[in-house]
Amino acid sequence: MASTTPVTEVHEAPHLEVKHSEITRRRAPFRWSSVRSYLGIVLIVIFCLAPAYWMVVTAFREVGYTFDTTPWPTHVTLDNFKTAFDTSLGNHFGRALVNSVIIGICTTILAVAAGVFAAYALSRLDFPGKFLVLGVILGAAMFPGVALLSPLFQLFTNIHWIGQYQALIIPDISFALPLTVYTLTAFFAEMPWELEESAKVDGATPGQAFRKIILPLAAPGLFTTAILAFIASWNEYLLASELSSDRTQPVTVAIAQFTGNQPHQEPYTAIMAAGTVVCIPLVIMVLILQRRIVAGLTAGGVKG
Amino acid sequence: MSVTPDVQTEEAAQAKAPARRRGRPRSELHPGERRLGLTLILPTIVLLAIVIGYPVVRAIIMSFQKDPGLDPATGLFVTGGNAGFSNYSHWLLEQCKSPSGQVAHCPPGTLGGQFWDSMFVTIFFTICTVVLEVVLGMWMAIVMNRAFTGRALLRASVLVPWAIPTAVTAKLWYFIFAYAGIANHILGTHILWTGGAWASRFAVIIADVWKTTPFIALLILAGLQVIPADVYEAARVDGAGAWQRFTRVTLPLVRPALIVAILFRVLDVLRIYDLPAILTGGGGGTGHATTTLSILVVDQIRQGFNSAAALSTITFLFIFLVAFIFVKFLGANVVQTQQRQQKGAL
């Protein structure tokens, strides 16, 4: 299991399992179950990657060969990426990318700024109503976004906010903040707080103990949480599709509404190119931070 | 919240708890701790009250008001007024006002007549996807738990479907399920995946299973990894076969993690919007074969806010009811799980 802190890594159970099974495997090197296990791994990797691979292959394929079913790249071209960023057909994919970054960063900063204090209080302090607060935050995480839509749509129409960034950032807080609070609460609960105490015993001021001991230890958890909140906001579609205008629409909406130069003909290759561009930052983040993201996800327990 | 504490073995809990207790004994609690705790919690509570509390209260108020429009009875434009429960009966009993002013069953083709259809579609999606995802996810988690080589590759690949935004996933599967697309090519079929009623429903289910199974697998894996190997060894010594070890050892020990994962998935699919809305244009088949409750709310917003508010309140209460049933009867006590973690951490 991916561990959240160096402390749990020491106690990790799987290490025992590894040793145990290595012994049994050495004893019987040609076990049928290990063949089955490898087959399982191959099947899982194909299951997860094949559709994504198909998107990338199609993104690099000439428009005339959209429905070519050759499994490897053929008729390779970069034209689709040019089409994706082309604004002459009424698509503003480049602007949508910028919008998504703006909305994602603002949402993440607000959610982490408020959430870090709440998570610290929930994991470290005792106060009345603590478990009620936890329950409310968990309930908020499961709240259907559609229940916010009609009142917000009416309100934002009345105060002329439709087509402004705050009309997209504020609703995104509704899922980003609960996600931030419980992911951080889980991270903080795993932190070796006794180090803070011992630093104080050794004569460090509370400020020094916080800066030199707690902050460096909490930074990875904070960073992972911020990434999860950013991904959640980057992927949001329902609220954005109703509350954005052409000027403020994020990539998810831009991709869903992507139009081609011929009516009734879906510009598949250009959409796959746009999809590939949207996924690149996410896949890179995931590949670099996979252990931490898995830890954050299983601690959070909710789809980001 | 967390799944991990629930599945923490006593071993792990024992390893951590004494250290924590030493580090922060209860007697050290400051009297100011309560005030500090409430102060730190305040920004979050205020923000949630603004972004969730206000809209919920507003939606409930709106749901008891009439939508502005032409009154079918008088032919005059009305700007609202108290609607009583008429917005709710409009959905739940599918009652519409006929041009003669009489209350009648909503004619086919109107949104009012689609409530129970979309309720069926939503529940159908929920049952199909959650069953498939849990069974497949369980298998994937077991394979991943056994894997020693290629762990990093496995972890990276299962994160890919999770990381791809649902909107992109929907467009990707829209392309895969195109008439001349790869799905029909591989299967050797000529199915109109996004056109036929049942075909489009299964297209949504398949796409959702692809996107979410890896996530379920990760949650179950986290539960599997804290089961100590000697429990299996003991079962094996006692003569338990592979199937018995699965049903008698793995399942009971992974049950708490599994139930919380299922609860989250169920609540998540009940509000599904992106996939059916983009993959099948919210329609499929006769026009509303994949219309879920969330899609119906969005369609209604264009015709009247107040009626949409009533429908979204019904949706919210329905999801709340399902969560309540889960917690009550299946023992998915999420807060208690958290509580246990808190106690362990003190």
Image (spheres, coloured by chain):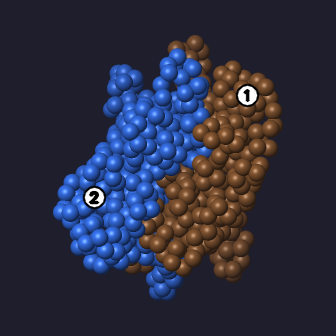
Chain colours: A brown, B blue
Residue A63, located in which quarter of the rendered image? top right
Question: Residue at 25% of width from left, 62% of height from top?
Answer: B99
Element marked by disc 2: helix
Mark 1 Cα shell of 10 Å, populated few (<14), some (14-19), many (≥20): few
**Tag 1: amino acid:** Gly
* Picture disc at residue B91: 2
The correct choice, above or below, for A105 with respect to A38 in the image is below
* Picture disc at residue A117: none
At which x and y percent is residue B28?
49, 79
Nearer the camera: disc 2 or disc 1 = 1
Which residue is at the front of the view, B76 or A18?
A: B76
Residue B82, located in which quarter of the rendered image? bottom left
At which x and y percent is residue A108?
63, 65
Which residue is at the front of the view, B123 or A35?
A: B123
Q: Is residue A15 left or right of residue B268?
A: right
Chain under callout 1? A
Q: Is residue B249 left or right of residue A282?
A: left
**Tag 2: amino acid:** Trp
At which x and y percent is residue B5?
45, 54
Question: Residue at 66% of width from left, 80% of height from top?
Answer: A206
Which residue is at the front of the view, B192 or B209?
A: B192
At which x and y percent is residue A166?
61, 72
Question: Residue at 40% of width from left, 59% of height from top?
Answer: B300
Whether residue A226 appears in this view of the structure is: no
Q: Is residue A4 left or right of residue B3?
A: right
Which residue is at the front of the view, A266 or A51?
A: A266
Chain under callout 2? B
Whether residue B71 appears in this view of the structure is: yes
Give the residue pinned by disc 1.
A64
Mark 2 Cα shell of 10 Å, populated few (<14), some (14-19), many (≥20): many
The correct choice, above or below, for A34 with respect to A47 in the image is above
